[in-house]
Image (cartoon, rainbow, N blue to C red):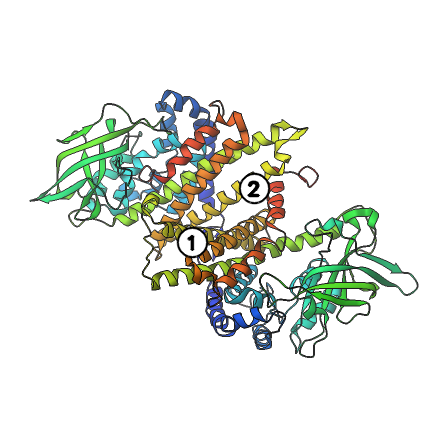
Amino acid sequence: MYSFEPNEEQQMLVDAVGKYAANDLRPAAHEAEESRELPKKLISKGWELGLLQASIPEAYGGFGERSAVTSALAVEEMANGDLAGALAVMTPSLFATPILLAGSEEQKQAYLPKIIEGEWHPYTAALIEYAFDFDANALRTTAKLSGENYILNGEKAFVPFAKDAEAMIIYADLDGQTQGFIIPKNAAGLSIADEREKLMGINALPLYRVKLDNVTVPQSNRLGGASGHNFELILASMRIASASAAVGVARASFEYSKDYAKERDAFGMKIAQKQAIAFMLAEMATEIEAIRLLIWEAAWMLDNGKEDAFKQAYLAFTGAADMAMMVTDRGVQILGGHGYIREHPVEMYMRNGRGFAMFTGLAIV
Amino acid sequence: MTIEFETPKPIAQMNTMLQSVAENMMRSVSREFDENEHAIPWSYVEFMHTAMKAAGGGGGLTPGDDKPKEGAEKRPPIGYQRLASQIEMLSWGDAGFYLITPGGGLGAAAVQAAGSPEQRAKFLARFNGEKPTFAAMCMTEAGAGSDTSAIRTRAVLDEATQEWVINGEKIFVTSGDKSFTEYEQFGKGFIVVWASIDPTAGRAGMRAFVVEAGTKGVTIAKLEHKLGIRASDTATIALVDARVPYDNILGSPTVEKTTTGFKGAMATFDATRPLVAASGIGVARAALEFLKEKLTENGVTIRYGLPRNKLTSIERDVIDMEIQLRSAWLLIIKAVWMADNRKSNALESSMSKVRAGDVTTKITQKAVEIMGPLGYSREFLLEKWFRDAKITDIFEGTGQINRLVVARQILGYSGKELR
């Protein structure tokens, strides 16, 4: 059957996240972006919504079952409030979800209960590398088996909360395949840059460069244990998360510019009454809905183990990145000169919107 | 409720059957009927009539009667979803042929939407008859295209005979010839003519009239020569003192200050826009599949999964086309799913049409470009699909009209507030 309505449980979650996004994240977004700082209380409040907790089974201390569809709904809603804030709240998932999806039993028991109990702890992951041709399936960071250990070398970029992280998953190339490795805090050879990354957008999120100089971990620290894991599943889950966040940001820009257009007078009428503006808004709304459905389908395929789910996640991710750029650009255009001024959020949405083409690895469903 | 993307089993089974119809009865003669515009592919028409009758579809493409058999488990209705899939699949075969699939089409849809139970019984039974039968909708005039309120065709009641006397000229009537001309091989059809019974009342004065095939005073003035969908006839119909029985008016014969009659026509469009969109998607899918097949033959593989900036131009194009095609199809599925579940879908319906109009033209245009001389040659059907596709952005409301509908919905504006 086809069906396009979230179930009751999902709807309750969307409503709760939506409330937090509108009442907490969005009002704090501008100040956070300018000061490059997210209030700790803001993150804690988001953590208490229990998105990650609800996706982990009771056996590991959680109270639910992971569903990519449910997570996609929640990510869109949260990013609709503020992208940087949403990514911060969800950072521990970057560590926990790959373990849930691909970790060994030992790894699940060692980490999952610890991560989700009580307060938000900074657990993170490092996928992106600082290269124009960065490709998650062809990493420059390497892992080599040496006796009983893996030795990692290379450099990772845009790693959220790396400075304070209790542990992180570092993705590296192992014999031509991307594999994750669990690296504890203070591992020998692991160095984290003092300076935070300076980017075009998401400035409130603390991102760091991470260097690996012969970092040595036992085989049991390879994600999934000695035999490893299927990275495609993790990558597809990251792509769906990134795509959902793109829909959230695009929607924020659409909603803001729509409201503005209904208020702004020109030539004796509201500018929304001009077809030039109204048609832009109609196309924005259509594009957002079309890509949202593509993402839902990809997430549903992933949840149901459908053939082609990975390809569909790639298509959804690629389509969402384009859509976010198109929509956020128009958001600025509709506000005209005011759109270019930092007092309105649409310029920030546009800066965030451009990032989705490279944001793989900053969120996961 | 839930979020699910599983194609319902009956639809999947039907698609398999229709694919063989498309390959064997449509694709094989597509070129022939493109080059002989207005020729009628009798074998397709007769086959479809027999097949649809046997399937209980009332001799035409309709959402069907979805009531489960007695004792059977109650299932959610999928009539419009099935119809959208049928149309997509048939248009994948040939969009022009799809349009001449026998049945009531838009004419019957108008009777269904605006007619009384008696009128429905009287006018719609014929589609389940022995012979394939057609009906058509006559809305557009030379001076009234998207702006349907500018319609000048007049209907005046002759008090003495209690007949409506209709005068005017309608253009762009899809299947107008098959619906009105009394071919031996066809059952007696009808056309539904939109006319004003009170020009001072604007849209409130607009009514639809059922005009039976062969009615005196009505002539097929012209058959258009078109860019594409050439297997489908597009007629100009002249009405000069055409007399129609009193009871053939759909809706109330008196003018109130409301525009319900006209809204009836617009409600028809809510139901049919995603279906027209589905037809376009069928054409676009045909073009994209052909393109990918030819690329494979020529040793070009599409490397899915690579970052954008590592892809070749052709890879980017093909990936974009796949994104466009699938997301446009999902908008359609959502719109018809809403129709099946009796949810108001004016917004989603027009969104699906906007998107389908855009992507079918873009995909077919790009496919021709990528195939170069092979795309432009009549040796392959690709150039035909390019021509067929463009109609998706035009009929059942142009892309611009549908943008207007979407914009009014999202902004909460009336037609007056956003013209």
Q: Is residue B337 left or right of residue A13?
A: right
Q: Secondary structure at mark 1?
A: helix
Residue lying at 63% horizontally and 55% vertically, measured from the top left: B396
Q: Is residue B315 above or below residue B230?
A: above
Residue A124 is situated, as x and y percent measured from the top left of the image, at 27, 34
Amino acid carrying mark 2 in the image: Ala
Parent chain of label 2: A
Mark count: 2
Residue lying at 79% horizontally and 70% vertically, measured from the top left: B215
Q: Is residue B124 above or below residue A13?
A: below
Q: Is residue A17 visible?
A: no
The single residue placed furthest to the top in the displayed view is: A35
The single residue placed furthest to the front in the displayed view is: B373
Parent chain of label 1: B
The single residue placed furthest to the left in the displayed view is: A147
Q: Is residue B82 above or below residue B187?
A: above
For disc 2, the marked residue is: A282
Badge 1 crowding class, 10 Å Cα cut-off, few under 14, some 14 to 19, many 20 or more, is: many
Residue lying at 49% horizontally and 52% vertically, measured from the top left: B362
Which quadrant would residue B265 be assigned to in this image?
Answer: bottom right
Residue A16 is situated, as x and y percent measured from the top left of the image, at 45, 35
Q: Is residue B305 visible?
A: yes
For disc 1, the marked residue is: B322
Amino acid carrying mark 1 in the image: Glu
